[in-house]
Amino acid sequence: MSDETAPRAAPASATSPSVVDRNLERLETLQGTDEGVFVLAVHAFVEGWIRDRFGYDSPDDGFKDLVQRFIDYCKRKFAGYVPGLDSMNALGHAHYDTNQVRHRFARLPPRTSQ
């Protein structure tokens, strides 16, 4: 792994359990309201957590790239299959939908937020 792709530790406050718990509570309040806003918020939470946890600060890193780097890191660290990575991969592939919300304030079907 090169220095460019090696994760760096984030400031403890950014990824502390209390901050993550508060952000998850915020997501919980959005669930069941507007699917587009909820899905956009989930993607923002995931992207922010990956950036904070691993110190990926470059604005050139897109969401799908960050998710893929996280998946690759987990596979290396845990040497193979890691439960939950299929969901992360699906999240990366569904990012187009969030762009429709961000750029056009589009509605998303309920299935998108499940």
Image (cartoon, grey):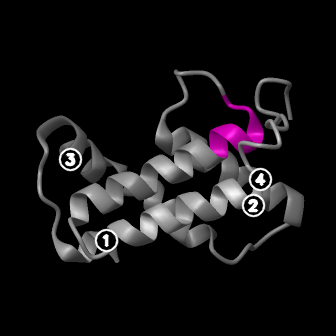
Give the crowd class for mark 4: few <14, some 14-19, many >=20 residues within 10 Å.
Answer: few
Q: Is residue 101 magenta?
A: no
Which residue is more in the foreground, 67 or 108? 108
Residues under numbered marks 2 and 4 in contact, where contact means CB atoms less than 8 Å apart: yes
Residue 16's tag is 4
Residues under numbered marks 3 and 1 in contact, where contact means CB atoms less than 8 Å apart: no
Mark 2 falls on what kind of element?
A: helix
Q: Which residues are magenta?
A: 50-56
Q: Position of residue 76 (x, y in %)?
A: 84, 56
Residue located 80% across and 36% down the image: 11
Mark 1 falls on what kind of element?
A: helix
Q: Which residue is mark 3?
A: 101
Left or right of 46 on screen, residue 6: right
State the separation of the CA atoms marked 2 and 1. 24 Å
How many badges with numbers are in the image?
Answer: 4
The mark nearer the N terminus, 1 or 4, is: 4
